[in-house]
Image: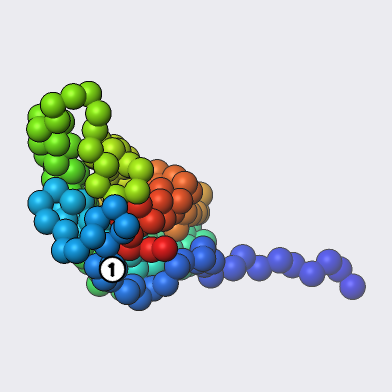
């Protein structure tokens, strides 16, 4: 018997990396830390609420990213089937079947929702900067006021900006994928788009540690 012929597979899937949860539980405002007794007001309240909002926005982003992974995989499977079956008579129109159109629209819708998340993160950065500048102006000496455990006010502005910068870069990559994946003409490009959406290369793994530290500092977690 001769060797068995190998058939090309048109299925394409990317295993979803562990995600904290597709559904998210918004952070609730918890009991004030020992340094801040009673109801928080002013700058302390803004920073604590901002920390909770940062957490909630990133949970929304993670859920949206998971939705996007599923859509990207669907698109890649349809595209790969067309790419593997194309011949010299195949036109670019043949590689863009009607079945892709609803999926492309769904993926762009996910991107638009991610834009809203980033807009909220940008607003939180501006808030934290404003608080830092105000507290710096109000201090009569070089010492910075500490509202919670150990972070001076400028540290909140730095952390908020670090997070916003990463997700801003990641959003630009999402835009590129959402606008181009349906027009990918080869398997390698499809693999790049699907892997990039899943693994989010611009979001550092240390982000989770930074977020955890922020929640601990503000008393949302103990």
Question: Where residue 215 appears, x then y in whole percent?
Answer: 35, 57
The residue depicted at 46 percent of the width and 66 percent of the height is: 19
Relative to the observer, which residue lies in front, 26 or 204? 26
Q: Which residue is mark 1?
A: 30
Relative to the observer, which residue lies in front, 108 or 44? 44
Query: Image quadrant of residue 20?
Result: bottom left
Q: How is the image coloured?
A: rainbow
Please identify the quadrant where the C terminus is shown.
bottom left
* Mark 1 Cα shell of 10 Å, populated few (<14), some (14-19), many (≥20): few
- Specify whether 73 is left or right of 111: right
Q: Find numbered disc 1 in the image and state the secondary structure of the residue it sits on.
A: loop
Question: Where residue 89 appears, x then y in whole percent?
Answer: 41, 57
Question: Where residue 17 appears, x then y in whole percent?
Answer: 51, 63
Question: Where residue 98 appears, x then y in whole percent?
Answer: 27, 71
The residue depicted at 18 percent of the width and 51 percent of the height is: 44
Relative to the observer, which residue lies in front, 167 or 214? 214
Furthest residue toward top: 142
The residue depicted at 31 percent of the width and 59 percent of the height is: 33
The residue depicted at 16 percent of the width and 63 percent of the height is: 39
Please identify the quadrant where the N terminus is shown.
bottom right
- Specify whether 105 is left or right of 64: left
Q: Is residue 211 visible?
A: no
- Decide: is 119 above or below 96: above
- Decide: is 185 above or below 108: above
């Amino acid at each position: 018997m001769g060797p068995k012929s190998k058939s090309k597979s048109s299925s394409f899937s990317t295993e979803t990396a562990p995600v904290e949860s597709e559904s998210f539980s918004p952070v609730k405002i918890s009991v004030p830390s020992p340094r801040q007794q009673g109801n928080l007001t002013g700058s302390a309240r803004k920073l604590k609420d901002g920390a909770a909002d940062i957490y909630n926005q990133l949970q929304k982003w993670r859920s949206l990213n998971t939705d996007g992974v599923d859509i990207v995989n669907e698109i890649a499977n349809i595209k790969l089937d067309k790419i593997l079956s194309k011949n010299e008579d195949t036109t670019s129109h043949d590689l863009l079947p009607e079945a892709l159109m609803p999926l492309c629209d769904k993926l762009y819708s996910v991107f638009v929702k991610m834009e809203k998340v980033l807009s909220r993160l940008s607003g939180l950065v501006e808030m934290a900067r404003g608080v830092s500048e105000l507290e710096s102006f109000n201090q009569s000496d070089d010492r910075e006021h500490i509202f919670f455990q150990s972070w001076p006010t400028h540290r909140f502005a730095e952390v908020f900006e670090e997070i916003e910068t990463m997700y801003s870069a990641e959003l630009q990559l999402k835009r590129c994928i959402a606008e181009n994946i349906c027009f990918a003409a080869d398997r390698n490009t499809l693999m790049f788009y699907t892997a990039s959406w899943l693994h989010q290369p611009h979001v550092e793994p240390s982000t989770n540690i930074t977020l955890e530290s922020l929640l601990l500092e503000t008393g949302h977690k103990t």
